[in-house]
Image (cartoon, grey):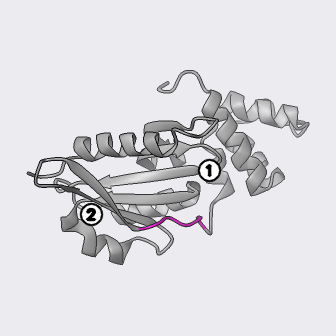
Amino acid sequence: MKTTDADIRATLHAALRREHAEKLAQPLILDELSLCQGDGRIDIVLIDYLLQGYEIKSERDTLERLPRQIEVYNKVLDRITIVTAPCHMDEVIKIVPEWWGIMKAEMDENGRMNLISYREALNNPDINAFSLAQLLWRDEAIEILKRRRLHKGLLSKPRNMLWSALSKRLNLQELRREVIHKLMIRVKWRE
């Protein structure tokens, strides 16, 4: 039986929930988070103190878009793991950066999906602050700038200028903390 995105996604969601069940603050797990203003969309993102992305490649997928996805995901996500069907393993190992995690997703003889860790994800060495700031809605960016008293001359500016101001005036750790906080408290997710 071929692995499907839905099979892998359901198993991965369950594994992430189990892995984080004991934590005091529960992480946010989202499907299909748009990155870099729609240049890419990560299959699953786990948000706690980091942005951890999971890209799924089932047997029904090709790896044609993977180089572009790597380029986009590397700008924003702190850690990235590709979860792939066995048929893609050799090629995935060649394509993804060494700091990406790799998991193999395969069905056992009883038809159960198993996720097998091949390589743990490491921290992204080169996050782009502007691309990270693009995860913020305009009103969220303004609120952060106001709270930090960095808003002078910016309130009527387009969001690109707000993102630029945040990416230049906050260090990466501060920006990540602000972005994660806004994502965690955001009420309406699909506007």
Query: Badge 1 is on which residue?
Result: 50
Residues rendered magenta in the picture:
119-124
Front in this rendered view, residue 178 or 191? 178
The residue furthest bottom is 94
- Give residue 63's mark: 2
Front in this rendered view, residue 49 or 21? 21
Tag 2, which secondary structure? loop
Query: Total label count?
Result: 2
Mark 1: give few (<14), some (14-19) or many (20+) Cα within 10 Å.
some
Q: Is residue 41 above or below residue 115?
A: above
The residue furthest top is 187
- Give residue 188's mark: none
CA distance separating discs 1 and 2: 26 Å
Residue 32 visible at all? no
Mark 2 residue type? Leu
**Residue occupying the point 77% across, 32% down:** 142
Front in this rendered view, residue 41 or 157? 41
